Image (cartoon, helix red, strand yellow):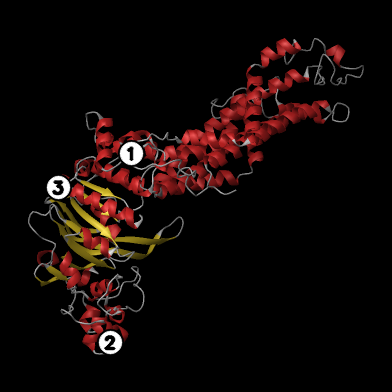
């Protein structure tokens, strides 16, 4: 992927902005696929995250959307250093944290926290709520009355502080997620990486947790990287949105602009698939993509979306053909409108209909 | 058992909303376990038998003194308790379990035998749990080459012909008073414990490794890591508490195996020293006189069966109560 990467995408794309809290530059992660019991040899690679660059400005919420398996969660784990990056750099307040050891990373852990997807798996069933939320204080040896601090946190996230000594099995999914939120909030971080924090919850509970996250953002001046596959949720909470496809960031824009004027054909197709309660657009205008997402073990050449792209077929004038540059060269994440970046050789025009191509 | 013991599957009692003011008493996992265990009559009987046996074993000298008025190697009544051909006499008022061929009280020897059996089995199981949990957790948690080495070691030990090797080691180490491995392993009780522990830790290690592998992938491990916890904290504070249930269950289930193993070694004359009463050795002695003195076989065998059965029932009950989601 990197051999045809455009020169210095970080200098042109959204990957460099002054004053960024977190900056990710050309971040890649591949997982080796090995064979053999005693002598392991690498037979293939899964390219989970490929050459991803973006910034996270203080106080904003950046939404990261994409289908299952597009590398959203891997990106989150790379930023929180739960996984080592294969290449690329991660900056926190201008400091390169990509290669920091556990010990050097420890002070920064207080600044970057994470909320996890599965409220049933993200809290230890053998610990009391007090122990779970108190763990950050233990690990960072924070002085003071820990019980009091934990009770305050519980109160803040909407848990009854009386339940300090209860075990997670006594709580519902939404309440368990509040435990996770309290734990992430304990060290007063600057950034919280939310990895699909509401995907496992009922819709009514989702709203409660989203409101809680928004309230906490106002109160503690938090910055969120909000990962989700739910486009409605992401639009609701995000200031800016980055769309991922097959490990690549294909489009970054302000939330409303992205929804109203998607430039990347994939974003356009994704948005047209959102069910609407009251729709003024005809169901036939939906852009239905053909085929499946290609295997990240064997990604397509050039633009990762070209085998399924309706726009490329319009440009080529045939449903069996795509332009050569789509097939051969990965398009850089370029500025197609003011603060609107898309990695596409032929960005979608305003109001352009793609569904005809898709159905052609 | 690859399924992790995540939490307890009982429905939560009463409303637990974050805002409720009315106090609903929460139940700790321990209380939930006890509630479920109490309903299991069979396991309860097992537990009662084990407690009774343990008490008998602990107070064997007192019981022997008060009830039978003689020790395990007392031969003062040997003349009365054997007939003119030197064959032992059956149960009567003085010797309630009858006599063995040396004219010793079988009842006293059986309750002293419980001491040997329980001591050897429990100490050996304790050692194998320590080794098994340590190596199993290291293998499962660290993974990679270390996991490969430990896992293959487990496979190798489990594939050895157990009894044959045990006999070999026992025989080799019992030939002289020096013992083997440069005198580090002396013949006697310690040797039996060593052999049993050496062959039973792989069972625990395998279970612990499997459970650790599945717990390691849980998000709460990642959460702990993202807070900056070191590996030792994650292993002891996050992983180990989740292993307690399988460890208790499997320890309870290998105790009867180890009791039988000790009996087998003693039966073959390689177990505990000559004069120490042991069910296995008593069975071995009885085998030659089965037709004329069946009581010599019946009583030790009955206790052996009862003990192993009780431990197995308790183990099953513990599994049901600690891990209700595991299928049978």
- Dot placed on the residue nearer the N-terminal end, 3 or 1: 1
Image x and y of residue A34, in percent: 40, 61
Nearer-the-camera pick, B104 or B107? B107
User: Which quadrant of the view contains residue A25?
Assistant: bottom left
Q: Which residue is mark 3?
A: A221
Q: Label 1's element? A: helix
- Dot placed on the residue nearer the N-terminal end, 2 or 3: 3
Q: Which residue is mark 2?
A: A321
In this image, B25 relative to A289: left or right? right
Q: Dot 2 falls on which chain?
A: A
Q: Are marks 1 and 2 in contact (CB under 8 Å)?
A: no
Structural distance between the alpha carbons of marks 2 and 3? 50 Å
Residue A29 visible from this viewpoint: yes
Q: Dot 3 falls on which chain?
A: A
In this image, B278 relative to A18: left or right? right
Image x and y of residue B85, in percent: 91, 19
Residue B276 visible from this viewpoint: no
Residue at 32% across, 78% down: A288
Residue at 53% across, 31% down: B127
Nearer-the-camera pick, B10 or A31? B10
Q: Which residue is mark 1?
A: A132
Q: Dot 1 falls on which chain?
A: A
The count of marks equals 3
Structural distance between the alpha carbons of marks 3 and 1? 24 Å
In this image, A177 relative to A186: left or right? right
Q: Are marks 2 and 3 in contact (CB under 8 Å)?
A: no
User: Which quadrant of the view contains residue A76?
Assistant: bottom left
Image x and y of residue B121, in percent: 61, 30
Between circles 2 and 3, the one closer to the viewer is: 3
Between circles 3 and 1, the one closer to the viewer is: 3
In this image, B68 relative to B256: left or right? right
Nearer-the-camera pick, A33 or B249? B249
């Amino acid at each position: 992927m990197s051999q045809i990467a455009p020169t210095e995408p970080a200098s042109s794309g959204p990957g460099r902005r002054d004053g960024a809290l977190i900056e990710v530059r050309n971040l890649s992660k591949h997982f080796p696929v090995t064979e053999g019991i005693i002598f392991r040899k690498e037979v293939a690679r899964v390219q989970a995250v490929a050459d991803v660059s973006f910034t996270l400005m203080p106080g904003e919420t950046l939404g990261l959307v994409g289908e299952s398996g597009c590398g959203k969660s891997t990106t989150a784990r790379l930023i929180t250093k739960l996984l080592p990056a294969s290449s690329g750099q991660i900056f926190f307040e201008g400091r390169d944290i990509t290669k920091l050891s556990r010990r050097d990373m420890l002070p920064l852990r207080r600044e970057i926290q994470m909320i996890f997807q599965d409220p049933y798996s993200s809290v230890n069933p053998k610990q009391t709520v007090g122990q779970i939320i108190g763990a950050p204080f233990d690990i960072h040896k924070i002085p003071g009355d820990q019980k009091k601090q934990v009770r305050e946190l519980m109160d803040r996230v909407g848990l009854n502080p009386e339940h300090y000594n209860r075990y997670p099995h006594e709580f519902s999914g939404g309440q368990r997620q509040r435990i996770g939120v309290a734990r992430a909030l304990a060290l007063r971080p600057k950034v919280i990486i939310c990895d699909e924090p509401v995907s496992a919850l009922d819709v009514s509970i989702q709203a409660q947790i989203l409101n809680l996250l928004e309230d906490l953002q106002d109160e503690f001046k938090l910055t969120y990287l909000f990962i989700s596959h739910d486009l409605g949720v992401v639009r609701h909470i995000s200031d800016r949105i980055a769309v991922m496809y097959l490990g690549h960031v294909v489009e970054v824009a302000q939330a409303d602009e992205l929804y109203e004027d998607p430039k990347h054909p994939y974003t356009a197709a994704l948005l047209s698939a959102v069910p609407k309660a009251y729709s003024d657009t005809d169901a036939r205008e939906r852009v239905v993509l053909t085929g499946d997402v290609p295997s990240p073990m064997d990604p397509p050449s050039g633009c990762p979306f070209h085998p399924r792209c309706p726009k490329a077929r319009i440009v080529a004038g045939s449903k069996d053909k795509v332009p050569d540059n789509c097939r051969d060269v990965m398009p850089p994440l370029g500025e197609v409108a003011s603060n609107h970046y898309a990695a596409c050789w032929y960005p979608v025009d305003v109001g352009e209909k793609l569904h005809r191509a898709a159905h052609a | 058992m690859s399924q992790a013991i995540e939490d307890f599957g009982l429905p939560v009692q009463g409303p637990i909303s974050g805002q409720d003011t009315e106090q609903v008493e929460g139940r700790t996992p321990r209380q939930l376990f006890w509630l479920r265990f109490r309903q299991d009559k069979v396991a309860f009987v097992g537990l009662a038998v084990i407690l009774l046996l343990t008490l008998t074993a602990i107070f064997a000298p007192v019981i022997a003194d008060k009830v039978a008025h003689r020790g395990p190697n007392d031969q003062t009544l040997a003349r009365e308790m054997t007939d003119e051909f030197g064959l032992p006499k059956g149960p009567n008022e003085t010797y309630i379990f009858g006599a063995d061929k040396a004219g010793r009280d079988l009842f006293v020897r059986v309750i002293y035998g419980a001491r040997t059996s329980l001591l050897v089995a429990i100490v050996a199981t304790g050692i194998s749990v320590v080794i098994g949990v340590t190596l199993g957790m290291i293998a499962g948690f660290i993974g990679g080459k270390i996991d490969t080495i430990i896992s293959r070691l487990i496979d190798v030990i489990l594939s050895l012909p157990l009894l044959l090797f045990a006999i070999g080691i026992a025989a080799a180490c019992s030939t002289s008073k020096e013992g083997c491995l440069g005198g580090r392993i002396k013949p006697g009780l310690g040797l039996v414990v060593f052999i049993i522990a050496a062959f039973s830790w792989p069972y625990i290690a395998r279970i612990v490794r499997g459970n650790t592998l599945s717990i390691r992938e849980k998000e709460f491990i990642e959460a702990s890591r993202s807070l900056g916890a070191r590996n030792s904290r994650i292993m002891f504070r996050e992983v180990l508490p989740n292993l307690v249930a399988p460890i208790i269950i499997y320890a309870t289930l290998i105790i009867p195996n180890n009791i039988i193993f000790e009996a087998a070694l003693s039966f073959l004359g390689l177990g505990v020293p000559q004069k120490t009463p042991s069910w296995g050795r008593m069975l071995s002695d009885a085998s030659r006189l089965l037709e004329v003195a069946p009581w010599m076989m019946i009583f030790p065998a009955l206790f052996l069966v009862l003990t192993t059965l009780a431990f197995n029932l308790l183990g099953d009950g513990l599994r049901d109560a600690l891990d209700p989601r595991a299928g049978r």
